[in-house]
Image: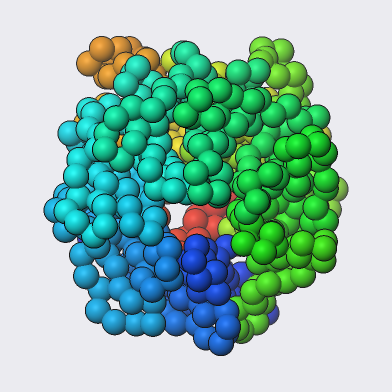
């Protein structure tokens, strides 16, 4: 597809057939997401699975236990939901993974898919709320955000339009009000909330000021109840409040928990399901609003990646740990915890557990940077090849959850180090926002601290160290190769930002808004900040071989700015490989994922002299 040196894909990663089968099985073994369900027919559910070899939507009738594949598209389908009556499946239709498209709808039991909301325009999805008689739909384009409402099956009416980024967040249970998350103050990373009646009249507005975002989770699931569950960060971390939007009165919920929380309502509107994250692991609790009592739910140690409360008050959740592949589980109202949904076929093989490392830092805002470390089975005491796998986001975090990708590197003889650098979530607002105005270089200071620890501890050496990541992690990888050339034997950058000025010009508008908030302006306004943060600025300092993977239709990290970087590498005769594929910001096709991972690990082995 190009004249660039192509990434090498071995016919097999391992000579041992059992080892080869094991790493591939972790990706290809059937998995399922947390099931959604219809509000009025909760026995009808919808989930995402890779059972067909591509991630697609599946309808599940719990009464008959029948499962039906709903979507079948070449690049897969990941976004869908059910109508309140359970009669229709909604799914988002984009083009080859470019994330730009429109909603389709088809019967739950099967049939032709049609345009869901005629009279609206295509865009990037920015919220969908389905009621019995009211529908709310948000779409984002280069011109900004548009939110429509449709009543009683009539034509959609524009409820809200603005050039700044935002989205539709919630619909009240009686379908009289919606919540708009907006950044009219100019900072999409710390949004405000506006509650509107469906005729467009304003009910209430809430903004906590610069640097303090609000996130509307859900209205109370009781008809006529005006209480909205909201995340705030007034005391330096994400906490909960309940906002009576009609009275414009709020009640903050203070929990004696050390980390950050999110929540959902129990169906009576008198209790909350609390998901608590601390040091990369999750606990779940039930909080009684009247008594203030916090009750632990019996979940195993690890990470919960999604949880919700059924109409009968059962809690369904997806759980995994680094050693144990994910399971969809349920906790009954009387406290019994069991596996809910097991896909057909053999379960994915397990992997190695993680060890916590807390490396002291002198610069704050926290005293330490948290890293998760796994050593390959059978590794001796001396230094071993190590991949520093940097997460995307940047506002995300590595957690004690199962990763087929991590497990594949471990099987290949690499230790794996995951760094929750400044910018990561789960460690307080100040830690998350510490990269503002200085992205990239800030995170790499934390990576360097952890890399120093790994060398001092005897885990690895620079000659045995590979830096890798995708999306923001891919960006940090390229930046690390230029700013820290003495540390790395090679770098693997998936769907990265490589030339930030070019990327800004071509990326989707919601990301341009995000970048303006993160950097403090656009490239035209603050060119020096973008130049200091851009990997292509440091191209002359790159010494280690580079592998880059990119999708042709990626709206987040567009292809042209990556080609700019590769051209600069080629001009300087810096060794590199390129893997280019026909999809967007990653692939939902299992066979494609296997090819990419195989290419990455084969490259990493060669970089440290293992092949």
Which of 162/2 is in front? 162
Is 495 placed above or below 69 here? Answer: above
Q: Residue at x 63, y 46 (%)?
A: 269
The quarter of the displayed image where residue 274 is located: top right
Residue farthest toward the front in the current orientation of the protein: 224
- Quarter of the image with the N terminus in it: bottom left
Percent coordinates x, y for residue 272 in the rendering: 68, 44
Which residue occupies 30% across, 48% down? 137
Colour style of the rendered protein structure? rainbow
The image shows residue 257 at horizontal and vertical percentages of: 78, 32
Q: Is residue 356 above or below residue 606?
A: above
* Residue 290: percent from left, percent from top: 76, 37
**Is residue 62 or residue 268 the one in the foreground?**
268
Q: Residue furthest left?
A: 119
For this view, does 151 lie left or right of residue 177? Answer: left
Q: Nearer the viewer, residue 195 or 527?
A: 195
For the C terminus, the quadrant is: bottom right
Image location of residue 369, percent across then percent down: 70, 27
The residue at 49%/44% (across/down) is 224
Is residue 128 visible in the rendered structure shown here?
yes
**Residue 550 seen in the current view:** no
Could you say which is closer to the camera, residue 266 or residue 50? 266
**Residue at figure coordinates x 62%, y 61% from the top left:** 310
- Report whether 483 appears left or right of 112: right
Asked if residue 117 is positioned above or below residue 292 in the image, the reply reads: below
């Amino acid at each position: 597809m190009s004249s660039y040196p192509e990434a090498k894909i071995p016919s097999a990663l391992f000579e041992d057939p059992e080892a080869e089968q094991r790493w591939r099985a972790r990706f290809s073994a059937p998995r399922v997401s947390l099931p959604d369900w219809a509000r009025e027919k909760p026995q009808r559910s919808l989930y995402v699975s890779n059972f067909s070899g591509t991630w697609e939507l599946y309808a599940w009738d719990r009464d008959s236990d029948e499962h039906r594949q709903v979507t079948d598209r070449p690049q897969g389908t990941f976004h869908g939901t059910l109508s309140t009556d359970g009669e229709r499946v909604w799914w988002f239709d984009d083009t080859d993974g470019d994330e730009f498209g429109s909603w389709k709808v088809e019967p739950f039991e099967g049939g032709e898919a049609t345009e869901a909301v005629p009279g609206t325009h295509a865009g990037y999805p920015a919220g969908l709320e389905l009621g019995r008689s009211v529908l709310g739909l948000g779409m984002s384009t280069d011109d900004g955000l548009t939110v429509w409402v449709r009543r009683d099956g009539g034509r959609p009416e524009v409820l809200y339009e603005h050039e700044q980024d935002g989205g539709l967040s919630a619909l009240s249970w009686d379908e009289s009000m919606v919540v708009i998350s907006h950044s009219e103050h100019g900072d999409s990373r710390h949004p405000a909330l506006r509650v509107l009646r469906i005729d467009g009249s304003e009910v209430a507005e809430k903004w906590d000021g610069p640097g303090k975002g609000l996130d509307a989770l859900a209205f109370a699931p009781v008809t006529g109840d005006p209480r909205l569950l909201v995340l705030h960060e007034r005391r330096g971390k994400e906490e909960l409040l309940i906002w009576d939007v009609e009275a414009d009165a709020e009640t903050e919920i203070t929990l004696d928990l050390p980390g950050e929380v999110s929540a959902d309502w129990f169906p009576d509107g008198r209790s909350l399901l609390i998901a608590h994250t601390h040091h990369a692991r999750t606990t779940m609790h039930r909080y009684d609003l009247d008594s203030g009592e916090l009750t632990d739910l019996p979940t195993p140690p690890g990470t919960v990646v999604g949880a919700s409360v059924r109409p009968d008050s059962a809690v369904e959740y997806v759980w995994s740990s680094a050693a144990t592949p994910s399971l969809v589980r349920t906790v009954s109202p009387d406290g019994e915890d069991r596996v809910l949904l097991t896909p057909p076929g053999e379960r994915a093989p397990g992997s190695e557990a993680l060890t916590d490392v807390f490396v002291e830092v002198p610069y704050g805002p926290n005293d330490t940077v948290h890293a998760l470390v796994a050593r390959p089975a059978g590794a001796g005491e001396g230094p071993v090849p190590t991949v520093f796998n940097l997460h995307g986001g940047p506002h995300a975090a590595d957690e004690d959850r199962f990763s087929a990708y991590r497990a594949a590197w471990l099987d290949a003889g690499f230790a794996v180090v995951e760094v929750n650098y400044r910018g990561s979530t789960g460690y307080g607002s100040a830690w998350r926002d510490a990269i503002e105005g200085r992205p990239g270089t800030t995170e790499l200071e934390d990576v360097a601290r952890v890399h120093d620890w790994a060398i001092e501890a005897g885990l690895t050496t620079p000659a045995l160290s590979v830096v890798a990541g995708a999306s923001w992690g891919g960006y940090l990888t390229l930046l690390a190769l230029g700013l820290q050339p003495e540390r790395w034997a090679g770098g693997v950058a998936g769907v990265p930002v490589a030339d930030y000025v070019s990327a800004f010009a071509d990326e989707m508008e919601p990301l341009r808004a995000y970048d303006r908030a993160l950097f403090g302006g656009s490239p035209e306004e603050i060119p020096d900040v973008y130049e200091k943060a851009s990997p292509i600025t440091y191209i002359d300092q790159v010494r280690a071989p580079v592998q880059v993977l990119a999708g042709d239709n990626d709206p987040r990290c567009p292809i042209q700015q990556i080609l700019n970087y590769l051209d600069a590498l080629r001009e300087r005769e810096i060794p590199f490989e390129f893997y280019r594929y026909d999809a967007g910001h990653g692939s939902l096709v299992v066979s494609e994922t296997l090819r990419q991972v195989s290419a990455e690990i084969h490259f990493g082995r060669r970089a440290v002299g293992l092949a």
